[in-house]
Image: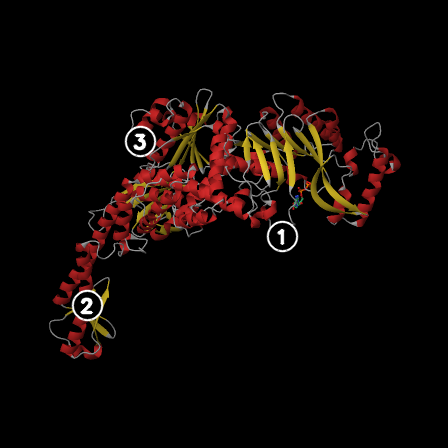
Amino acid sequence: MAEKKETPMMAQYRSIRRELPEDTILFFRLGDFYEMFFDDAKTASDILGITLTKRHNTPMCGIPYHASAGYLERLVKAGVKVAVCEQIEDPATAKGCVKRAVTRIVTPGTILDEVALDGNQNNFLAGLYKGKNRFGMAMLDLSTGEFWIEESGDVSSVQANLARYAPAECVVAEEQMHDPSFKELTLEATNTLLTACEDWTFEASSANDFLQRHFDVHSLEGFGCSSMAAALGAAGGVLYYVKTELRRNLSHVRNIRVKNPQDYMLVDETTATNLELVAPINSNRQAYKATLLNVLDSTKTAMGGRLLREWLLRPLNNLVQINARHDAVELMVHNQTYLRSLRDILGDIKDVERLISRIGSTSGNPRDVRAMGVSLEQMPMVKALLAGKGTMLETLGEEITSLPELVALIDTAIVDEPPLNLKDGGVIRPGYHDELDELRDAATQGRKWLAEFQASEIERTGIKSLKVRHNKVFGYYIEISKSYLADVPESYVRKQTLVNAERFITPELKEYENKIFGAQERSIGLEQEIFNEVRRQAVEHLETIQKNALAIGQVDVLASFAERALSNNYARPAMGDDGRLDIHDGRHAVVEQMPDAERFVPNDTRLDRETHQLIIITGPNMAGKSTYIRQVALITIMAHMGCFVPAAKAEIGLVDRVFTRVGASDDLARGRSTFMVEMQETANILNNATPKSLIVLDEIGRGTSTFDGISIAWSVAEFLCKNKDMQAKTLFATHYHELTDLALILPNVQNFSVLVKEKGHTITFLRKIVPGAADKSYGIQVARLAGLPDEVISRANDILTNLEEGEFGDTGQPKIAKKRPHKLKANVSQLDLF
Ligand SMILES: Nc1ncnc2c1ncn2[C@@H]1O[C@H](COP(=O)(O)OP(=O)(O)OP(=O)(O)O)[C@@H](O)[C@H]1O
């Protein structure tokens, strides 16, 4: 049998598909649908759960155009790239097969649709490039136009950024995909899609060239990054990928900022996770959203929400900047009426940063423009409220520009509640444009004429059931039921016969129909033109609007800090540079907010280099040791981000980095056992801490045998105290009471313990931290509270008594082993007993 000849459309499909990478799915526009064919159809139908059909043996599936955003989002979230191919000429006037072209390729790092994006989180696409001994990183958020670079000699700083900003996608030069120095990066463990791009796009000369051309400048000096070869390489790679390979509009990306790791306190991935800064460790606590971010976030705008997250994961490390934030917060704390007015206005500001990006990339719809107008209308009020206030607030006020002409234009041109789709009409306000008003009148008049025409025809013909109707095939027509057919005038032209009726047209009716349709069509076209002009004028102010958004975000976070300071009773910390930490009545910001929690008992903390450099905290299980040491870390971080702190009073010396080693969990995804994780985290601390660091250690060495554990813990503590280059402020919670002896031999070590009240077999937790070491562990009492069977508790008490009496024998075995020799093998290890 002769092979069936391929249709022109299928030939067109194949030629477009051939140009795309394998890992891309092609959305091929056919009328009101996007169709997918062959393997694309199989993959998409699997991911989307839609029916896979076959036509002429070709597997295919389709999704309706109007509902495509949701499907596209699901595919992209599953890690697939989607190329959207549109009809680029009007099918009505096209000769032969309609012309089609891929207009954009959407990837996880470049999805823009609102449905897919969390307003309070950036959606970054990262670029990574290793130059000569330097690692460069670029971050682009297409949805906001934010673009920044950073360079470091240390790959761990790249890792910290990857963890902190959780980019949806990361582009890397092909030749560096398997570079050994990137081995430590654990992109596979995150949801980041790794995309390899051609090497030359990252090379200095081409990267410089792309950037200069994109920003339309002769040199990058003005951006302060001309010597950052590695970072510029990363930025060049990102720019080329998005602009050229994905064919995306980047006209709203007008600036590139440089971030310097030295300006920030380093909060690494482990610390952010352990302290539950933005995500709870334990998923069943999800319901309470027990994170510092959640406790601190009372921002009113999406810009503020995103910035708060950034400030939390990247606290400052500069006294002047920190104090500037504290000054602004204090001013608002002292003037609550002022704070309320400011926050009320902020509440009316929409996500202008993302709105202007959408409007700038021409996907902005009438509602986006209207929301922009309403938001910009608030700017003069915010500006007025910030003026004359001194502090950062005044500077931020000066950075805000009111755009009265644009606000007036949007207000007079666009109706209050426009439809989402421009094609629906009714976007432009009546009275704004004479010709549009006339066309609309003509359409309305036409409809009125139709009603009158029907009435006069009924009267003229005497046919009571005569109706003027409309359908897509005939346009307007006259319908007359069978029983009146005899009375139909001769001038009526028959178009269709139904079972009970016949349909007619008349030249007069057709003439009016043309007028109505013509007017409607032209009025929609004119609305489109007017709307595009409004949009164009908005885009002219793109950079100003982006600057406004940046300033509003900062004002919002500062106001949110002030609100939380008032509602949660926080105090302004006094910042210093002497490395001391002195906290009075400090509290755990998150634990104190937990619903159903007991009343929180505040505690003091003193840390300094001379006498209180390493604090050992002992006390029963469940007493509050972990809570206490974490609360100190949280207070320190909060102070550095510019926030007030949960304490009666606090003096906080600048800290360059907060380290935490808490809890024990294995990391199967990265192939590491519990003890291995523990030791790697400890090694990281010992290798990187400085005298300006704060270290929080919640038990070390628990993942191995007691003797090994105590030995490691002791020597770690000793190292931290004796090593002059180290001597970082350290809080060390432990159950190894042996460690409390360190205070006897080292002048900079102090013992503290958590008070409990003991009555018979039960204990009450007092949650108070007091000087001195704890004398007992009370582990068995806590086990009883936890509901261990009485038999087990009683046997444990026996064993404990024996151990306490005899301690360990010469071989390191508990003496109890001697009491029951018949039950134990000769070589049994000490831990087997338990
Ligand atoms: N200062 C406090 N005020 C009120 N409740 C507290 C306080 N400190 C801790 N708690 C409560 O006690 C619980 C147990 O505290 P935490 O986990 O800090 O004890 P721990 O001594 O570290 O225990 P373990 O040694 O078993 O790890 C916390 O979940 C919290 O609900």
Label number found at residue 189: none
Mark 1 vs 3: CB contact within 8 A: no
Q: Quadrant of residue 732?
A: top right
Q: Which residue is mark 3?
A: 214
Residue appearing at x 61%, y 27% in the figure? 728
Residue 477 % position (x, y): 19, 68
The quarter of the image that holds ligand 1 is: top right
Q: Name the residue nearer the viewer: 275 or 72.
A: 275
Q: Amino acid at mark 1?
A: Asp
Alpha-carbon span between mark 1 and mark 3: 55 Å
Q: Which residue is mark 1?
A: 596
Helix, strand or loop at mark 3: helix
Helix, strand or loop at mark 1: loop
The crowd level at tag 3 (other Cα within 10 Å; few <14, some 14-19, many 20+) is some
Residue 777 % position (x, y): 76, 39
The crowd level at tag 1 (other Cα within 10 Å; few <14, some 14-19, many 20+) is few
Quarter of the rendering occupied by the C terminus: top right
Question: Of circles 1 and 2, which is in front?
Answer: 1
Of mark 1 and mark 2, the one earlier in the sequence is: 2
Mark 1 vs 2: CB contact within 8 A: no
Check mark 2 vs ligand 1: CB closer than 8 Å? yes or no: no
Q: Name the residue nearer the viewer: 168 or 312.
A: 312
Q: Amino acid at mark 3?
A: His
Q: Which residue is mark 2?
A: 448
Q: Quadrant of residue 270?
A: top right
Residue 548 % position (x, y): 36, 40
Check mark 1 vs ligand 1: CB closer than 8 Å? yes or no: no
